[in-house]
Amino acid sequence: MNKKLIVSLAVLALIFTCVSISAANLETVDEGNYTISVPADVNFKEVKILPSGISFKLSSNGFMNDVLKVMFDGKQSEKKDLLYYYINFDKDPVANYSSLKSTDAYISLIKNNTGVEQDGNGSYKVFKYQNKTNKTDYDYVILVQDQGLFSLFPQERIVGIEGNDLKLMTEMADSVKFN
């Protein structure tokens, strides 16, 4: 009986240690509109992103002005193996300039580009890119939608996380809190 108790406690201690180590590698950063936990040992730089699958018409202002209107800000790791970004479809130029008027439209766009919805929970969906054209393309994208008050009033804003390490990305998605 004592051996079973000792083995059970040892297994419990091992599980607790693994969870503690995993959580210790992440640090929470406040991005203004949301907070997210990111790997503490990774440096991120700000980048402009032109989401794949977005189409837009050229205006009389010229090509570069149009491109800037559909870009949004994100943060990418120095190794370029992890990226996260924020879109507010009520205020963001992507929503105002392209045909993307809602989180549902953006999620559909990602689903059409990836082809496979892998997993998810009430606040996020996980997609796997099927047709990677470059070695540097990401394997997965997770879209976290703001569920609003008591998860009853979903908001038109999301955080996207793209990368190759699904376990890490899931931990990051679980940590997202909208302000």
Image (cartoon, rainbow, N blue to C red):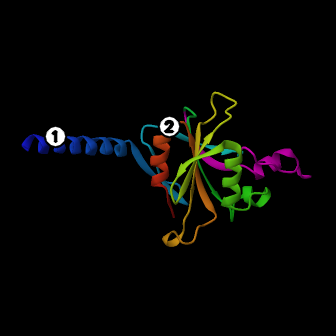
Comparing 61 with 117, the one in front is 117
Tell me the quarter of the image containing the N terminus: top left
Which type of secondary structure does the marked residue at label 1 adopt? helix
State the residue at coordinates (13%, 42%). Answer: 4
Of labels 2 and 1, the one closer to you:
1
Residue denoted by label 1: 7
User: Measured from the top left, where is residue 124 in percent x and y?
Assistant: 54, 55
User: What type is the residue that disc 2 sits on?
Assistant: Asp
> What residue appears at the point 50 percent right and 51 percent down from the top-left corner?
173
Which residue, as the protein is rendered here, is positioned at the far right? 60
Which percent across, then down, holds residue 75? Answer: 58, 44
Is 14 placed left or right of 148 in the picture? left
Q: Position of residue 159 (x, y in %)?
A: 58, 54
The number of numbered discs placed on residues in the rendered structure image is: 2
Q: Which residue is mark 2?
A: 165
Who comes first in sequence, dot 2 or dot 1? 1
